[in-house]
Amino acid sequence: MNRYIFTQQHRDNLPWWNGTWLPQTVPSEAHVQVQLPSKPIHWVPDLGAGCQPSPLAGLVPTWLLPLRATVDLLGTGTLPNAGRISGTTEISVFDYRVAGVGIAALCLRPEPAVSDPTLLGFPPGTPPFFVLTLIVGVPQLGLP
């Protein structure tokens, strides 16, 4: 099975998308991996009600919005990262399985919480947490 790998550069609605952001699409039963710079940052998966997809600005058909794909955390790990991303010494790895048809959100929050996103390796002026919105089991969308 293919593995779909996302990093801090793939999270939702970053400024350089200039209003053209669309969620990524993956097939049902996809193995999705998120890799984020860590140590001293500690990332915690958020699978609760507070983990919501990013607003989609009318780019997803209305029939899809109420459908939610399932998200299962398969495991976590780390990779060495010395010297690659300033201020961090590891990459935290989070493996998920997404299944069904609909929207899925993968959320990770730093612990302890920080207010400055640059401490997380994120651009200034962006939210200090990670959200990746996926469309599961639906073919790739295109810009109008």
Image (spheres, rainbow, N blue to C red):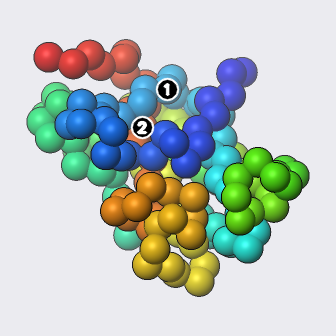
Count of all numbered marks drawn on residues in the image:
2
List x then y, in percent, for residue 3. 68, 28
The tag on residue 77 is: none
- SS of the residue under disc 2: strand
Amino acid under disc 1: Val
User: Where 29 sits versus 88, above or below?
Assistant: above
Q: Which residue is rendered at x = 26% and y = 16% of the image?
A: 142
Disc 1: CA contacts within 10 A as few (<14), some (14-19) or many (>=20): many
Q: Name the residue under label 2.
A: 134
Residue positioned 33% across, 51% down in the render: 53
Q: x, y percentage for residue 71?
A: 53, 48
Q: Is residue 124 left or right of residue 38?
A: left
Residue 120: name its quadrant.
bottom right
The circle on residue 26 is 1
Taking 43 as reference, is 21 left or right? left
Please determine whether, in this image, residue 92 is positioned above or below residue 48.
above
Residue contact at pointers 1 and 2, CB within 8 angstroms:
yes
29 up-or-down from 116: above or below: above
SS at badge 1: strand
Quarter location, residue 92: bottom right
